Amino acid sequence: MPPTPLIASDAHLGHDGLVEVVGGREVACYESPARASAIREALLATGDFVLEPPTDHGPDPISAVHDLEVIDVVEHAWTDAVADGWDPERPLLPDTFLLRAYAAGMALEQLPPARHQRLGAYCFDTGTPIVAGTAAAARAAVDIGLTALDHVLAGAPLAYALCRPPGHHAGRTLIGGYCYFNNAAICAQSLVDRGSRRVAILDVDFHHGNGTQQVFWERGDVLYVSLHGDPAASYPSFSGFALERGEGAGEGATLNLPLPPGTDGAAYGATLREALDAIRAFDPDAPLILSLGFDTYHADPICNLALVTGDYAGIGAAVAGLGLGVVALQEGGYAVDALGANAVAFLGGLREGIADR
Ligand SMILES: [Zn+2]
């Protein structure tokens, strides 16, 4: 099998020095540049991957998924804050949030004009800090995803997008959970815009991709299937329950498969079969968009499943069994020392599965 394109850039290195608030404490962001470096190094060392730069796809694919107001905030909150005297050594984190569900009587048309002052109107948590390089990194991650998609549309059976920051928590109007632009949703929408009528997204990150679910909630042309830690015990807490199945034209096109804490490889595999059966029944006419996280690993510092490195090869092979082209986009995974081995196992299993079919 020819080498698999690995799309990556150094733009993410500017999205650094970040802190988040966890359990009342300010901590170094788990979502660090070292994550992407570890994965890139390990994959290239196998000789099975060829490094490719992203190509510029411009702003239109981003605005096809995200409202212009939230894009404007991501692009300009930092420069507005610094112009207003913000210490450039400190990441910008919102501390006041606009809860639109409780907005009756609020003058929403009078949000503060400076983008850093309105950040809390477009963000849902304290896990999404902004520094000088954040907007450029988020834009590059989108281009990385779209370039991987280009490779698959040009005939590669698999392309791997080393996206950082990740994307699946970012919704149409909200950033959150380390995510600014939703790389997977943008790829899926791009396929629809090129004429696909049934696009499937499989999300195997530990966390529910609440942003992806929201983008396609009322859409029947994009199936969203997610295996994730039970939101009753895990971030993002308020979505990812099995009863969430989409609405209107999208009813039944969202499938959430929450997993209890401690789920091991065997139990995970059984649930994965259910996910893959749903994708087969949907009968996609486009490559699979795969939101790939390794925070299902047993030693992940912020998650609670129990997969081991060897499990990932089997999961990758099972995904290959769908017979679809695969655009794999990096989402989470925070056990930095194990990320390289887990990526090699997963993508190696995927490659072997593709070679066998
Ligand atoms: Zn995650």
Image: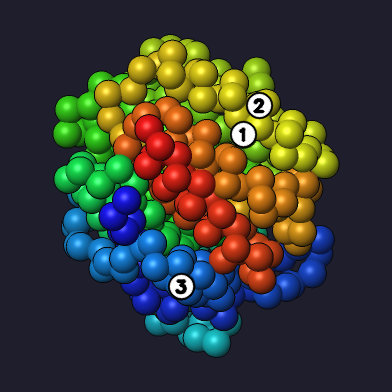
Q: Position of residue 213 (x, y in %)?
A: 50, 32
Q: Point out the frontmost of discs 1 and 3.
A: 3
Q: Quadrant of residue 260?
A: top right
Q: Is residue 64 left or right of residue 217?
A: left
Residue drawn at the location 38% of the way across and 21% of the way down:
219
Q: CA distance from mark 1 to mark 3?
A: 30 Å
**Viewer-nearest residue: 325 or 175:** 325
Q: Position of residue 144 (x, y in %)?
A: 32, 59
Residue that carries the numbered disc 2 in the rendered image: 271
Residue that carries the numbered disc 3 in the rendered image: 45
Q: Position of residue 98 (x, y in %)?
A: 57, 47
Q: CA distance from mark 2 to mark 1?
A: 8 Å
* Amino acid found under the numbered disc labelled 3: Ala
Q: Do callouts 2 and 1 mark residues in contact (Cβ within 8 Å)?
A: yes
Q: Is residue 91 left or right of residue 154?
A: right
* Amino acid found under the numbered disc labelled 2: Thr
* Mark positioned earlier in the residue sequence (1 or 3): 3
Residue that carries the numbered disc 1 in the rendered image: 227
Q: Position of residue 15 (x, y in %)?
A: 47, 74
Q: Is residue 2 left or right of residue 295?
A: left
Ligand 1 within 8 Å, label 3 CB? no
Q: CA distance from mark 2 to mark 3?
A: 32 Å
Q: Do callouts 1 and 3 mark residues in contact (Cβ within 8 Å)?
A: no
Residue drawn at the location 38% of the way across and 62% of the way down:
48
User: Judging from the image, what secondary structure is the residue with disc 2 in?
Assistant: helix
